[in-house]
Image (cartoon, grey):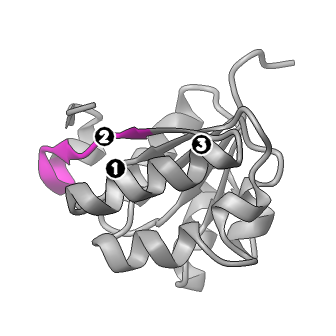
Amino acid sequence: MSTLPKVAWIGLGIMGSPMSENLVKAGYDVTGHTLEREKLDRLTAAGGTAAASVAEAVRDADVIVTMVPASPQVEAVAYGPDGILENARRGALLIDMSSITPQTSVGLAAAAREKGIRVLDAPVSGGEAGAIEAVLSIMV
């Protein structure tokens, strides 16, 4: 049995797919959600678990990572009845690796704090190649 934290990964695009797969290779239990079925199939082929919704992905997670294009997408997956904040458990850590505005990050942290969820703003640099090779720079 793994003592590693359970990870929910939201956003399995050009960056998110290889990043989540690298966590699976490292022994993490990763449950992912994204809008494209083929990206979910790619995660399951790598040993991860596909979730039909954000709510399903985050329900049992210790750590939730979002890697989506920009502020509107972060807000879409974070807020609302099916979003991260309504469905993640208290004490979870939300790490947003998307390229979002400082205002979005501050607002998300404040809203999450009310739900007992910790937030790290952690954008990355290194592009698709860095994601595939697991050599991204992460600015937390």
Q: CA distance from mark 1 to mark 2?
A: 5 Å
Give me the residue at 51% from left, 79% from top.
Answer: 76
Across the whole image, how many numbered discs are drawn on residues?
A: 3
Q: CA distance from mark 2 to mark 3?
A: 17 Å
Give me the residue at 26% from left, 60% from top.
Answer: 103
**Residue 26 seen in the current view:** yes
| Mark 1 and mark 2 residues within 8 Å of each other at the beta carbon | yes
Q: Which residue is mark 1?
A: 97
- Work out which quarter of the rendered image holds the C terminus and state it: top left
Q: Quadrant of residue 105?
A: bottom left
Q: Is residue 55 magenta?
A: no
Q: Which residue is mark 3?
A: 113
Give me the residue at 40% from left, 77% from top.
Answer: 73
Instruction: Please report the bounds of the magenta region as a residue range.
Output: 120-129
Specify whether 128 is left or right of 76: left
- Relative to 108, does residue 23 appear above or below in the rendering? above
Q: Position of residue 124 (x, y in %)?
A: 21, 44
The dot on residue 122 is: 2
